[in-house]
Amino acid sequence: MALTLLRGLKTHSFRLYPSLHFTRNHGVLYFSTKSTQGQTATREKQHTRLKVSSKPESVKFDEISKNYEAVIGIETHVQLSTLTKAFCSCPYNYGSQPNTSVCPICMGLPGALPVLNTKVIEYAVKLGLALNCSLSLNSKFDRKQYFYPDLPKGYQISQFDIPIALGGYLDVDLPVEFGGGHRKFGVTRVHMEEDAGKLLHTGNGNYSQENYYFLLIGIVDLNRAGVPLLEIVSEPDMRTGIEAAEYAAELQRLVRYLGVSNGNMQEGSLRCDVNISIRPIGQLEFGTKVEIKNLNSFSSMSRAIDFEISRQALLHSLGQADEIVQETRLWEEGAQKTVTMRKKEGLADYRYFPEPDLPSVNLSEEYVNEIRDSLPELPEMKRRRYENMGLSMQDVLFLTNDVNVAAFFDATIATGADVKLATNWIMGDVAAYLKNEKLSINDIKLTAHELGELIASIKSGTISGKIGKEILFELMAKGGTVEGLIKEKDLVQIVDPTEIEKIVDKVLANNPKQLEQYRGGKTKLQGFFAGQVMKETKGKANPGLLNKILLDRLNSKS
Amino acid sequence: MLSSAQTTPRLLRSPTTTAAAAALKCSSQIITTRKSLISRQTSAVDLAKSFLHRLRRTEPQLNSFLYVPPDEAVLKQAEDLDKKIKNNEELGPLAGVLVGIKDNICTYDMPSTAGSKLLENYRPPYDATAVRKLRACGAIVVGKTNLDEFGMGSTTEASAYQVTANPWDLSRVPGGSSGGSAAAVSARQCMVSLGSDTGGSVRQPASFCGVVGLKPTYGRVSRYGLVSYASSLDVIGCFGSSVADAGILLNSISGHDKNDATSSSREVPDYASQFLEIDDLESKPLKGLRVGVIRETLEDGVDLEVISSVRDAVSHLEELGCLVTEVSLPSFSLGLPAYYILASSESSSNLSRYDGVRYGNQVFGDELNSLYGDSRAQGFGSEVKMRILMGTYALSAGYYDAYYKRAQQVRTIIRNSFKEALDKNDILISPAAPSVAYKIGEKKNDPLAMYAGDIMTVNVNLAGLPALVLPCGFVEGGSKGLPVGIQMIGAAFDEEKLLKIGHIFEQTLQGCSFVPPIVADEWTP
């Protein structure tokens, strides 16, 4: 593959009419996190996907697309968050100075040998089980051979014919905005391998430069070389960009739940390559497959797929289907289109053979069972459990999206808090705060226990909902306990009717003019009086009681 | 029983004869060195000087070494050792022992080229585990020895730098690929040396140069720091002028290494305990030991003189009390093709890292492909290129099953047949090579003939077994004859038995002095 990488680097001018370049705006909601921070709060406003553009070409395009079905499979590389690399003891930290985390082994120096980090197996087994795969108790490593400057040994240690896990599936609940629904996407295999180094691009990552490779030599960063990866290959089960993006998002959720990877797409900890072909609806055989790379977010994944479907559909409709060739295309975020990266020159021959430097990988049933028993509650189980608690799918998806939010929610309801109230608080004020402050739920001072206390205090009438909100922000920013804050600020709600009556009477007495106006028919002034009472009580008067007494008093003397 | 029961009396000495016994302390340079250092009979500096002197004198004719550090560097280590002796500090088991290291074994303080232009001037940032262990035992590295490029060859003619001459006859090859290490020990340029053995690269040159060569069980010695040729076959091996030296050397480099996943965690026995003084031997010291002579190794294609020398040696073993039978290994001849497919396949992969990006001269063309192609075309020698091509072919889609996979099946058959034979016998016997050392250039243009010379040794690598080669006689040639080596093959991890038998064989072999003419005048053991 890599041998031919730089041959067809000329970008091919794109054939579609510019006007077809997606006037449609897909603000898509992925129930997944885009960075490790503030995820759950970053809900993008979504537009409906099928919003019809005013441009006539788009209408025509939608007509064309309707007749075709896309077949999508995804290869995902997940970088494992082990302390050290797969075959040596170098640590890996994203973003460190080039070539500072290297040793003879990951540099592939003559005479250096790999020794497997057993954590890699543990993580692979975890993910394999979580993906409902059957595990290969006796697997092995193989060498995948190709030349490329970022591959120091000239081969990648990978798994070929006996991957550690085979034949599973992934459960996905599609977002309600896209019609919802449950999907099971097949997983062909999961295998262990090592990452390559990184070419330090000088420019904007433009692959079309002539003699580009001159720039590569000598500027390879091997920090990433040898970092353990799991490659997850899906069955070609996805049909739309949304399905594909949701598959990837669920995978990200899964590795985060399992704690085997940070799943961060921007840092390249989770990388998706999409294989896509289209065929006229009703046709059984697959069309010509195109691979799309450089997908840095779930939304770009979805958009790239939609673009590719329309590109291919148009070629079909113009009778130019033969111009769809097996190739690798790059998604260009700026231009919102895919462009040819390289054409395949026949099948690449990687000359796989068993890695002689590493013994075979033999797992005992016992070991596998131990790991199975130690698996945490996974997203799918959580979603079903929350659903059974009576939460809406929207709420369920929100809460289960981030493992930390889910854990916070679980801990909150474990204090006895009402499920719906806890959901509302977390999805409402807590989420908004996280979004504004760009924090994750683990960064804030509020504990689940205190949120439970807060909910209980409101429910019991000790404080009003309004006061509760105020306290909440204090708890999130500064910490402390609900009880402490209530005491400290003297916030206990006034629920004694006689006390409220007294204050109401005082307010009415102090505002005779307004009282007269009210009684003259300007009943809107009720709000003014209520506000005055609240001001007088520093917001502590029980609102229901206050309104009842106020109305009583206002109307009694009329 | 073997048919040729007639013995050649000149080779034999009755084990019961104790007069003029070549006592152990004389045959082992390591033990002698230790004793003379501790007794202050000699100093480490004097010892080092005498070896360096001989090395400098003989090297222009032999070309055993690719690199020898400045004398001061070696003498400095000897001085440090003398200070330790003076202060009565404890000495390592290899204190003052001068070692040559095959140049495909990494040394942090000397270049490690593996005999290739691609690694010209390459200095590794680390010591191979075996070297590290040697140094920790007090050994002093006197230089890096010549080899066929990346260990691929049987003569050192495939070295990118020089051809080593055989100390017994300078017009002949020393064998290979560890020819430099074998010649250096033979010519007493160093006391012992490390080589590597992928298909016979320690044993065949040991046989050609008249020294002891020990190929340990696969996994006995860490490969970390050994420039890979064929990972599933490569082992680091030992050269010595006596079985005891080879055994003591093995002792110091064996054992599990966390840096080599294929190294064995089996305990390392004390091989030195096998080396009984000749005076302590019983009349039939090897009584009851079952020795199987591999029939297929004494048939057509093997020089008659070699066959006769080995048969004599077998008779000698019988006299020592061994029960000798002939065994047949029908799969024996399959070893050669299987070996060349597997070794080439693995090497085509192991050598892909020498791509011009990091090592060797970068040859820039129009595109990345030509950088790889041209850099490799210029950097590798023709033997290496041929094996890379063969290996690449054997691993290619569509050919994998017919070649690589089939060769692996053959390997399993060979392994099983050896296992079976070794269940019935303590050791197996064969010549170390079908011929004695041949002329430089003789087989250079006939690779198949050269490959055929590996027939005796490759099976042992495929089976992963230990084997000891030791000189057992001479055939005519050169000024004083050319040495013949006998190969003793043992069960996996049973180096102990090989060393015990080899040592007794050596101690009782009479009338043979395996000191080559080039140093015969000055070398008095």
Image (cartoon, coloured by chain):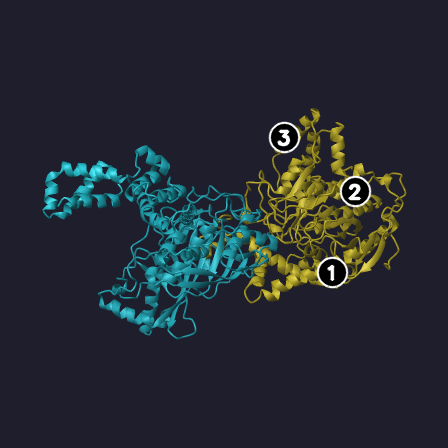
Chain colours: A cyan, B yellow
Residue B34 numbered mark, or none = none
Task: Label 3: state its secondary structure.
Answer: helix
Q: Earlier in the sequence, mark 3 or mark 2?
A: 3
| Residue that badge 2 annotates | B274
Q: Which residue is mark 3?
A: B76
Measure how far apart labels 2 and 1 are at the Cα level. 28 Å
Image x and y of residue A403, in percent: 42, 50
The reply to whether label 2 and label 1 mark residues of one chain is yes
Left or right of residue A467: residue B89: right
Looking at the rendered structure, whether the residues under marks 3 and 1 are on a common chain is answered as yes
Q: Residues within 10 Å of mark 2 (few under 14, many from 20)?
A: some
Q: Is residue B211 left or right of residue A177?
A: right
Amino acid type, mark 3 = Lys
Hey, which quadrant is residue A75 in on the image? Answer: bottom left
Residue A207 visible in image: no
Distance of label 3 from label 1 (alpha carbons): 51 Å
Secondary element under disc 1, as helix, strand or loop, is helix
Q: Which residue is mark 1?
A: B417
The x, y position of residue B360, in whole percent, is 51, 48
